[in-house]
Amino acid sequence: MIRTLLDIRNIHVLSGDGQAAELQRVHCPAHDRTVALEQCLACAESGGVTHDAVTHLEYASCRQVGAGAEARREEARKAAERAPVSAVMTRDVFAVRPDLGLEAVTELLLERGFGGAPVVDGEGRPIGVVSRTDVLDHRFDAGDTGEAMAAGARVSRGHYRVELGRGVHAEPPPDGSVADVMTRSPLTVPESAPVAEAATLMAERGIHRALVVANDGRLSGIITTSDIVRWVAERGRQRHPRA
């Protein structure tokens, strides 16, 4: 009996009502599709969740039937140019709902150091992307409503407190919600698509990230240019260990 550890994809979704949802997904090797973690654990072949003491990550254990999935993985290792996006993408993703306020999404992007975040509907399907640029453009279009403050004045934004110098303007938190500023119709790629295909699409559109979706259209991860560069570097080290 073959025992396999499966990556758990964690999608953290923030809503405008202050609620946070955790969507956990696993790619099932026996059926070659992505399912909810609860569905995976309910399967007769499931071995439960295993915690790795080295990586500090959790994996779903699968006692898969047959060698078909193992053969597919071996073929993928021998044909790196056909490596699927799911092998490269970022699996721990923070997503937001369209009703989330702009102040909250701004704090999330600043606190986490993100350039943007996927926007998903109630089923976890991507409907857009919101970026720091989108928020800044919205504030610019709305006009500068800041007021000049004397030197030494301080303002707070979430966890941040900044002392302002003379002539600096402080603006109130941005009004509106993610739905008002997000970029709709984001670039999405299937998790089974080759990395080369995703890289080509991103280069053609001049963007640095694409949303990865499972067979059912739900968000499964994100692939960025940084992910692809790291993957290429890793392949290079495997082929040329001395380098």
Image: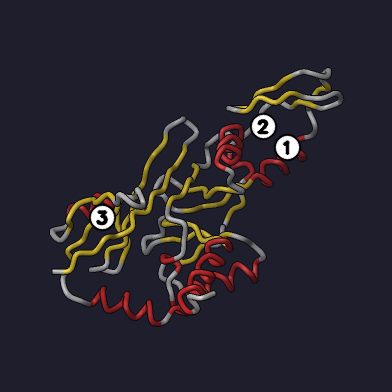
The residue tagged with tag 1: helix, strand or loop? helix
Q: Is residue 30 left or right of residue 209?
A: left
- Marks counted in the figure total 3
**Residue 139: assigned label:** 1
Badge 3 amino acid: Ala
The residue tagged with tag 3: helix, strand or loop? strand
Point out the frontmost of discs 3 and 2. 3
Badge 2 amino acid: Pro
Q: What residue is shown at x 63% (from left), y 28% (from top)?
A: 160
Q: Is residue 142 left or right of residue 239?
A: right
The residue tagged with tag 2: helix, strand or loop? loop
Q: Is residue 132 left or right of residue 77?
A: right
Whether the residues at callouts 2 and 1 have beta carbons within 8 Å, the answer is yes
- Kindly report the distance in space between the C-alpha atoms of the residues bearing marks 2 and 1: 7 Å
Whether the residues at callouts 3 and 2 have beta carbons within 8 Å, the answer is no
- Kindly report the distance in space between the C-alpha atoms of the residues bearing marks 3 and 2: 41 Å
Quadrant in which residue 122 is drawn: top left
Q: What residue is shown at x 17% (from left), y 75% (from top)?
A: 66
Which tag, 1 or 3, sits closer to the chain's start?
Answer: 3
Q: Residue 50 placed where, x, y %?
A: 24, 51
Q: Residue 62 placed where, x, y %?
A: 21, 61
Badge 1 amino acid: Arg
- Kindly report the distance in space between the C-alpha atoms of the residues bearing marks 1 and 3: 44 Å
Local crowd size for mark 2, using a 10 Å CA cut-off: few (<14), some (14–19), many (≥20): some
Q: What residue is shown at x 30% (from left), y 77% (from top)?
A: 72
Local crowd size for mark 1, using a 10 Å CA cut-off: few (<14), some (14–19), many (≥20): some
Q: Residue 61 placed where, x, y %?
A: 22, 57
Q: What residue is shown at x 18% (from left), y 57% (from top)?
A: 46
Which tag, 3 or 2, sits closer to the chain's start?
Answer: 3
Q: Which residue is mark 2?
A: 174
Local crowd size for mark 3, using a 10 Å CA cut-off: few (<14), some (14–19), many (≥20): many
